[in-house]
C-alpha cells in the first residue's frame, strides 16, 4: 500500500544521508520534497502541513544539523513523527465491558463490513476463545442476512436466526436477548450501508446505537478510496461517534494516504487492516511497524 511513497522517501533520504554536513537549506529542500511525496500519496493537506512543520522545527531547532550524522537524525525524526501521526500504539478491539459486549460495524455498502465482521468473529473465537454471535441488521439488501449466515457457517461462528420483516432495531434487541440467553461473550452487529452517506442512514445508525449500546463502533472504510475514506470517517464520527477504524483492501495498490491521515483527521485509531478476501486476512495496525515499512 505504501510502495510508491516508500520509494520516494528513500530517494530523498538517501540523498540527505550521503552528505556529511547539512545546512538549514538542505533540510528545507528535503522537507519540500517530503511534502510533495506525502501529497502525492494522498495524505490530507493539513495533515501534511503539520507533519512537515513539526519535522522541520525539530530538525533545525535541535542540534541535528551540527551532529555527526545529521541525515540519519532527520530520518529518525521523520520516523518518530510518522509513528505519532499514526497513533503511537496499536489499539486492539476493547472487550472490557460486561458480556455480551456489542461491536457495531458501520460503513458504506461494499466497504467490506460483512467480510470484516466474520474476520473479527473468527479471530475472537479462535485466538481469544470468546463465544461470538453475529447478526446482520441489513434489511435493505435482501441477500445481506443470508451472506452473513453463510460466512458464519463457513467459519464456525453462530449467527442470529433470520426472521423476515423485522426492523434493524428489532434485530438488535433480539440479538442481545439471544446473546444473554445463550451465554455469548461478544455480539457483532453488521449494519446496512448505502452508496453514500445520507440522513436516513445516520438516523438508522443512531437508533441502533441507542438500543445496542455498543462498546465498540468500528467504521469499515475502503483504503482504495483515499481521501473519501477519510471524509467518511470524519462524518461517521461526527454523526454517530466511532471508536475505531478498520481499513480494508490494504492489499490493493492504493496510495496509502487514507491510512496516514485517518488518525490525525478523526482522532480515532485505525485498529485493524483487511489484507485480502479470506477470513484470515486481518491484521492489527501497528504504527511503529507501518512507519518502518514506509521508511524501508
Ligand atoms: P459490505 O457491503 O460492506 O458488507 O461489503 P462485503 O463484506 O460484502 O465486501 C465487498 C467485497 O469486498 C467482497 O467481495 C469482499 O470479499 C471484498 N473485501 C472485503 N475486505 C477486503 C480486503 O481487505 N481485501 C480485499 N482484496 N477484498 C476485500
Image: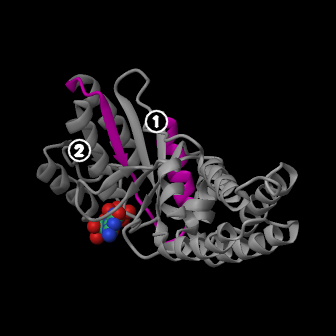
In the image, taking residue 30 as reference, residue 169 lies left or right, namely left
The response on whether ligand 1 sits within 8 Å of label 2 is no
In the image, taking residue 63 as reference, residue 192 lies left or right, namely left
Q: Residue at x 64, y 69 (%)?
A: 13
Circle nearer the N terminus (2, 1): 2
Residue 144, position as x, y percentages in the image? 28, 61
Q: Which residue is mark 2?
A: 122
Whether 189 is drawn above or below 184: the answer is below
Whether 183 is drawn above or below 282: the answer is above
Tell me if residue 59 is in the magenta stretch. Answer: no
Q: Which residues are magenta?
A: 182-211
Whether 37 is drawn above or below 183: the answer is below
Q: Secondary structure at mark 1?
A: loop
| Ligand 1 shown in quarter | bottom left
Whether residue 239 is visible here, answered yes or no, is no
- Toward the viewer: 290 or 138? 290
Q: Which residue is mark 1?
A: 214
Q: Say the numbered circle drawn on residue 274.
A: none
- Toward the viewer: 20 or 146? 20
> Crowding near pointer 1: few (<14 within 10 Å), some, many (20+)?
many
Q: Nearer the viewer, mark 2 or mark 1?
A: 2
Residue 241, position as x, y percentages in the image? 60, 45
How much space separates mark 2 and mark 1, taking CA atoms? 19 Å
Q: How many numbered marks are there?
A: 2
Residue found farthest to the top: 98
> Crowding near pointer 2: few (<14 within 10 Å), some, many (20+)?
many
Amino acid at each position: 500500500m505504501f510502495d510508491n511513497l516508500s520509494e520516494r522517501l528513500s530517494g530523498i533520504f538517501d540523498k540527505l544521508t550521503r552528505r556529511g554536513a547539512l545546512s538549514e537549506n538542505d533540510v528545507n529542500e528535503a522537507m519540500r520534497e517530503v511534502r510533495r511525496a506525502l501529497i502525492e500519496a494522498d495524505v490530507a493537506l493539513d495533515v501534511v502541513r503539520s507533519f512537515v512543520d513539526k519535522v522541520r522545527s525539530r530538525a533545525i531547532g535541535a542540534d541535528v544539523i551540527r551532529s555527526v550524522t545529521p541525515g540519519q537524525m532527520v530520518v529518525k525524526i521523520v520516523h518518530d513523527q510518522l509513528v505519532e501521526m499514526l497513533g503511537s500504539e496499536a489499539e486492539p478491539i476493547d472487550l472490557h465491558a460486561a458480556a455480551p459486549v456489542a461491536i457495531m460495524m458501520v460503513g458504506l455498502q461494499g466497504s467490506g463490513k460483512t467480510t470484516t465482521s466474520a474476520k473479527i468473529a473468527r479471530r475472537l473465537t479462535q485466538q481469544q476463545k470468546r463465544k461470538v454471535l453475529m447478526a446482520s441488521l441489513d434489511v435493505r439488501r435482501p441477500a445481506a442476512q443470508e451472506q452473513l449466515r453463510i460466512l458464519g457457517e463457513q467459519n464456525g461462528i453462530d449467527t442470529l436466526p433470520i426472521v423476515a420483516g423485522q426492523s434493524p432495531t428489532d434485530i438488535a434487541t433480539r440479538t442481545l436477548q439471544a446473546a444473554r440467553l445463550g451465554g455469548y461473550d461478544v455480539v457483532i452487529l453488521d449494519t446496512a450501508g448505502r452508496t453514500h452517506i445520507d440522513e436516513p442512514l445516520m438516523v438508522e445508525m443512531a437508533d441502533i446505537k441507542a438500543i445496542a449500546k455498543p462498546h465498540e463502533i468500528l467504521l469499515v472504510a475502503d483504503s482504495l478510496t483515499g481521501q473519501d475514506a477519510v471524509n467518511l470517517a470524519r462524518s461517521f464520527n461526527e454523526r454517530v461517534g466511532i471508536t475505531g477504524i478498520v481499513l480494508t483492501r490494504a492489499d490493493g495498490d492504493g496510495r496509502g494516504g487514507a491510512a496516514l491521515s485517518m488518525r490525525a483527521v478523526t482522532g480515532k485509531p485505525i485498529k485493524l487492516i483487511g489484507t485480502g478476501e479470506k477470513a484470515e486476512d486481518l491484521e492489527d495496525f501497528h504504527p511503529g511497524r507501518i512507519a518502518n515499512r514506509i521508511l524501508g
